[in-house]
Image (spheres, rainbow, N blue to C red):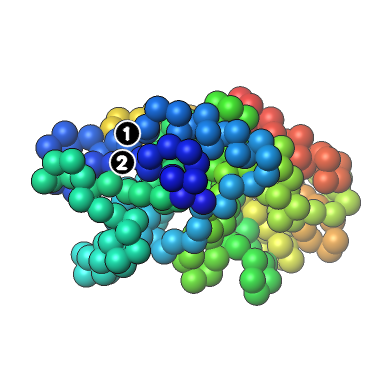
Amino acid sequence: MSGDRAGAPPPAQDGPGSGSGSGEARVPEGLVSAVVNLVDTGPVLLGAYTIAELTAVDAVVDFLETRPSDEVLAEAVRSLAARQMLVAGSAPDQVQVRGDLGIAVAFQQRARSVLDARTTGTEPGEPWRILLLPQPEHICLLLRIDALGVHQIGLYAFDEALDMLVDWLPRGPAADPAPGADADAVLTGAERSALVTVTHYTARGSAEVAGSSTDLVLARRGGRLHLFTRDPADRDRLVAGRADGRDGVRDRVGALLST
């Protein structure tokens, strides 16, 4: 999907060296409502991008561990420009991020929380990491990241995005939570495990300033699903809990997003 097909001009973002220095996307009037209306009819897929391409337009960089080298970033800028996704802005020191990538940047900057889920024990073709960025209109910007670092981005109805996440997380019949259970031993022997972290943040220009966060750990071992949360009195300690089946996991994850 492109900005033109959304029925509005593509969003613009200040580029590196901008006179404003904010790097914040300016969203054309009507764009958000037009895209939200499209999501109501089905998922809006926004393409696949490398870490360097996302970093070049300041998208989700605060959630990524490594920054590509200047040489890699320069090549990403040239690639985006060749595809008309980066064009000169209204001022000499600005660029416009156009089309689907521009829409992704605009919706990312509107979010005020992110769910970051990382899984071990994935199979070929599966993402190893998923990001959900809820929007006020009960939709989600969803990023699936594979082993090659390709980020597939789309906008989905909130419930659909949550279902996709839960279906990807470890699952199985609930293990009985044993007092004093050794979380390290469970995770070491797990066939599949996941760390789910929800972080609330505020924005300063294009930078996300992290606030409170909550973790949920899931591990399937011996066909049984173990669940752990952090001890409020000792954040370094994991406490065993329970989630009954898929619905139980969905309820726990949904509760994290609603807090």
Is there a contact, CB below 8 Å, between mark 1 and mark 2?
yes
Secondary structure at numbered mark 2: strand
**Residue 98 x/y as whole percent:** 36, 49
Q: Is residue 45 visible?
A: yes
- Estimate the spatial distance between the alpha carbons at disc 1 and disc 2, rounded to whole Å: 5 Å
For image coordinates 48% across by 32% down, the residue present is 32
**Residue 86 x/y as whole percent:** 29, 55
| Numbered circles on residues, count | 2
Dot 2 amino acid type? Ala
For image coordinates 14% across by 41% down, the residue present is 91
Q: Residue 163 has which mark?
A: none
User: Going by the image, does 234 lie left or right of 245?
Assistant: left
Q: Nearer the viewer, residue 122 or 22?
A: 22
- Near mark 1 (Cα within 10 A), the count class, few <14, some 14-19 or many ≥20, is some
Please identify the quarter of the rendering in which residue 136 is found: top right
Dot 1 amino acid type? Arg
Q: Which residue is mark 1?
A: 26
Quarter the C terminus occupies = top right
Residue 231, above or below 178: above
User: Going by the image, does 158 lie left or right of 129?
Assistant: right
Q: Residue 12 has which mark?
A: 2
